[in-house]
Image (tube, helix red, strand yellow):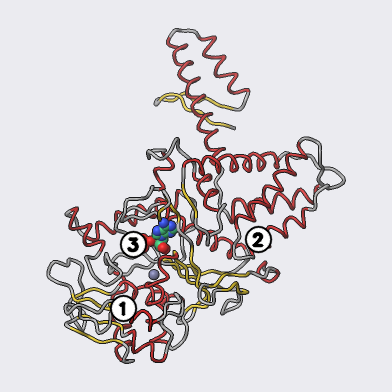
Amino acid sequence: MELYKENQLKIYNSLSKTKEVFTPITEGRVGMYVCGPTVYSNVHLGNLRTFMSFDMIFRYLLHLGYKVRYVRNITDAGHLESDADEGEDKIAKKARLEEIEPMEVVQRYTVNFHEVTKKYNFLPPSIEPTATGHIVEQIEMIKEIIEKGLAYEVNGSVYFDVLKYSENNHYGILSGRNIEDAIHNTRALDGQSEKRNPQDFALWKKADERHIMQWPSPWSDGFPGWHLECSVMSSKYLGEQFDIHGGGMDLKFPHHECEIAQSHSCSGVQPVNYWLHANMLLLNGQKMAKSTGNNILPEEILTGENKILSKAFGVGVVRFFIMQAHYRSILDFSDEALLASEKGFHKLMEAMEVLKELKVAKTSTFNVTDWKNKCYQAMNDDFNTPILIANLFEAVKFINQIKDDKASITATDLELLQNALHVFVFDVLALVNDAKEQSSDKLEGAVELLIKLRKEARENKDWALSDQIRDELADIGIQLKDGREGTTFSVN
Ligand code: AMP
Ligand code: ZN
């Protein structure tokens, strides 16, 4: 039987602002859309935290036995510098500054994003569509919204009419913003603006001659508004109504609110059943952000090359650090916090090694079944990874007690414990045991040193020492092989 049938998963829904039992539209299947990166610079650790939260959620849904279609887009056009539909396109600006093609910017940072997510042990999404690959569909959606009377054209640009939409629908349903208040509190538009009301947002913008990214449309040569791509790509690949939509908290307004308005205008239904928002990673008490420079790159943590770090840290430590906080809580990044996570992570990894060699007994002094249920309860309670990790450490304590002959476990319980720990540590949290990788790096270094000493012995015609090195290494299972390119080794 699939695990989802015996686990009642509850998810905090930002739309209803309550925890709700998760029931997918189609039994056994989940459609999940997550707003992806805007590829105009390297992803920082803050971005990565949000994507990692959804990687963990994707992994847990898969573990429960759901067939998940996970769509995470790449924003490669239409994201302007300001949320008020003003300023340059972020990608076009970077292209102008670096004197390269916008698509070169897109390529460079998409490749970087893929490298980083691979290094950090993410599962790839099922579909990764791009905004520029869906211009035709975006134009079609704009036409539909105009036909419904909810958008208007001015000088080649098209804007969504928020006031008109609000006559029969609830704009603010997700963010809790009150449209009436917003109208009273927003300063009047200066004569320059084409919008009827400041709340309106762009569906299509006419490009001026400086704007390098532009496409033909019925209204002008221009480009789509940023919010549109997500409405288009989510409905194209997941349908008019789908299960989960995710993103960082900062996208709730205006991005997700506008997405709902656009999609709802076309389909007449609420597009998303469960809205999930991940909280921010802070650095120096402020949100990590590309624009302010207050950020650290995921690659810098692995090399230690950033002045806020005292040393390099492995992928496992960073994932552990992020998973120790609930995805809806703020998390403060610091060197001290990483050092503390490293201690905990190593303790967990050591126990995972000890677990492989434990002796079994006739009785268990720990209720493994209860413990395993508590792990599932934590994950079923809105993916509560900090509580899951606290439970994992209960198991660590027990494992160490067995090793010291202060506790005992039966063969059946040991198998249960091993399997469950493997699932939660490696499949769901996706921690990577780089402590082990680091020790294999050390082993490689030591064998290379012995190969060098053996070479020196041979050069000095000290055949006895050279043979001794080869034979004693062979005794412990390390074979040396002399070839034209030098000596290599293999471990049996
Ligand atoms: P962007 O590339 O700017 O569109 O952002 C990609 C994702 O990262 C979005 O879901 C943002 O909400 C999220 N994000 C941006 N800054 C942070 C941060 N400091 N902490 C967590 N998530 C963030
Ligand atoms: Zn989006």
Image-quadrant location for residue 134: bottom left
SS at mark 2 in the image: helix
Q: Quadrant of ligand 2?
A: bottom left
Q: Is residue 196 visible?
A: yes
Image-quadrant location for residue 374: bottom right
Q: Is mark 3 within 8 Å of ligand 1?
A: yes
Q: Nearer the viewer, mark 2 or mark 1?
A: 2
The disc at residue 38 is 3
Considering the image in quadrants, where does the C terminus appear?
A: top right
The amino acid pointed to by label 1 is Gln
In the rendering, at what x and y percent does residue 166 appear? 38, 87
Q: For mark 1, what is the residue?
A: 138
SS at mark 3 in the image: loop
Image-quadrant location for residue 128: bottom left
The amino acid pointed to by label 3 is Thr
Cα–Cα gap, marks 2 and 1: 40 Å
Q: Nearer the viewer, mark 2 or mark 3?
A: 2
Badge 1 density bin: few <14, some 14–19, many ≥20, Cα 10 Å: many
User: Is 326 situated above or below 467?
Assistant: below
Kindly indicate whether the residue at mark 3 contacts the one at mark 2 (C-beta within 8 angstroms).
no
